[in-house]
Amino acid sequence: MTVAIAIMSTSGLATADSTGDSTGDIEARLAELEQRINDAEQRARAAERRAAEAEQAMAVQRRTNETDQPARVTAQTEDLEERLAAVERQASGEEGFSFNAYARSGLLIGEGGKSIDGGPYLTPAGSVGGAVGRLGNEPDTYVETVLNYKTRYDNGAKAHYRTMIADGVETSNDWTSDESSLNVRQVYVELSDLPSFTGAFENSAIWAGKRFDRDNFDIHWLDSDFIFLAGTGAGIYDVQLTDDWKANFSVYGRSYSEYPTEDSDTGGDTDNLTFTMNNYVGNWQWMVSALSAADNEERAMDTGATAADSGFHTMLAYHGDSFFGLADGSFKAAVLHGRGLGAETKVIGGDGNLTDDATSTRLGLYGTTYLAPKWRLAPAVLAEVSEDRYAEGDEYSWATFNARLANELTANFEMQYELSYQWMDLDPGSTGNAVEGSYRKFTIAPTFKPEVGGFWKRPEIRLFASWSDWDEELNDFSDEDALGSAGFTGGEWAFGVQSEIWF
């Protein structure tokens, strides 16, 4: 309190001086503030004496209770322990309200001093999920705000309520309501530690509502999930089938609406249902999903193909606790395959335009390690092949190779570098132009942060310069994508600044 008052006094003196008050007035105010400081210090000493006296009295009472009133002291002790435990749960986040967030925002400016197209999905392969490196390549402002409330009940049961609100825009204006895509992305309740759950379900958690699946995981440097299971539904986590085998079960719904049918230009709608079993044995994960969208085959396809009304999806993944067994660090690797509605291998059930014969196979992996005490490396590979995706005979093949390198120079500053290469061979059949070629990008980014060390520490403020180039043939894939835009021809530099935070 003394420090706070001293600060107030300093502020008050500065204000007096700046407004031209007389010296006598300043001295009077100073005397008044000195007296207030003395009074505050006396109150603090008095409070300390009362606390010491109370502690001594409690010690005497405790000794008396130990001999004369054991039942009452036991009850008082248990009450105090319960209150202390409640405070500790609140402090640890196990109970009460908490706030989490993710956000990024910045400028991406081309050589001509104007904003340019960007984003991890700007290449023709981006139309089928082919992401490239995101460092120095993002023109948007995107924010996720997550509100949580957790409760623990007297019987030990726990409840978790979550709401997540998100928005994203590409304009740099301060007022963006006309371009806003504000959305409630999650709202659900999860119950765990239910005392009536026994056996295989003893440590399980059940949930219902709209949510991202708890066990989604991604390659951050590409802004691409390995797997993204989301929608509205219900499920149960952590069913202990054997000592070494846990499984999650869920059903997610996603809506396909306002698509043309043979009888109506905008009259079709249905819901895709994804039934998933997610298995964990040690570091291994095996995920199996079945998909169904009744009447989706009535969708009128421009290609003349028949839309899928069902599908299958599976993923085999390994979550490593070293850098591919070569050094300290971590890695993740996954192979995914889907048919029909499951041929959208990343966002399961997210694409209703897939044909009944569509097939896709995707490979993803990344790792993190230290090459030297101040040098971090994070390589990543993401690749996919698909056939009969939107039209009979179409073929999409692409592969992205990416590496993020960071050199920690001081406690608050590091240099980040990112190199990306994407090869693509895309043949959309009768719906567009077939192209084959590659895209290259290199970024250098001086980065400031409160504390360096590891790829997952945020916030960061980055300055960056990015050079990108691509084969001219890729401009012919579409007039509507970034590479088909007039005047955007490759071999160009982009500059900017960006902040990124999560907690």
Image (cartoon, grey):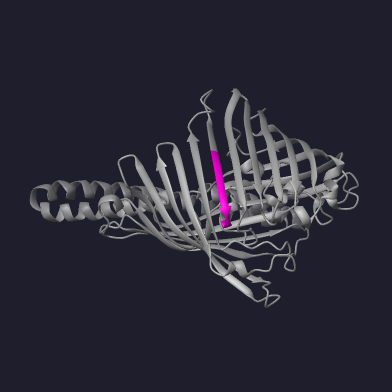
* Residue 458 at x, y percent in the picture: 60, 42
Judging depth in this view, the residue of 335 and 236 nearest the camera is 335
**Residue found at x 73% / y 56%:** 22
* Residue 438 at x, y percent in the picture: 78, 38
* Residue 224 at x, y percent in the picture: 63, 46
* Residue 365 at x, y percent in the picture: 58, 36
**Residue found at x 75% / y 52%:** 428
Judging depth in this view, the residue of 233 and 151 nearest the camera is 233
Vertical side of 415 occupied by 167: above or below: below
Q: Is residue 454 visible?
A: no
Vertical side of 20 occupied by 295: above or below: below
Q: Magenta stretch: dominant SS?
A: strand
Q: Residue furthest left?
A: 68
**Residue found at x 63% / y 58%:** 355
Judging depth in this view, the residue of 62 and 39 nearest the camera is 62
> In the picture, residue 407 is in which quadrant?
top right
Q: Which residues are magenta?
A: 334-341
Is 137 magenta? The answer is no
Q: Is residue 22 visible?
A: yes
* Total number of numbered discs in the rendering: 0
Q: Is residue 103 left or right of residue 87?
A: right
Q: Is residue 251 left or right of residue 224?
A: left
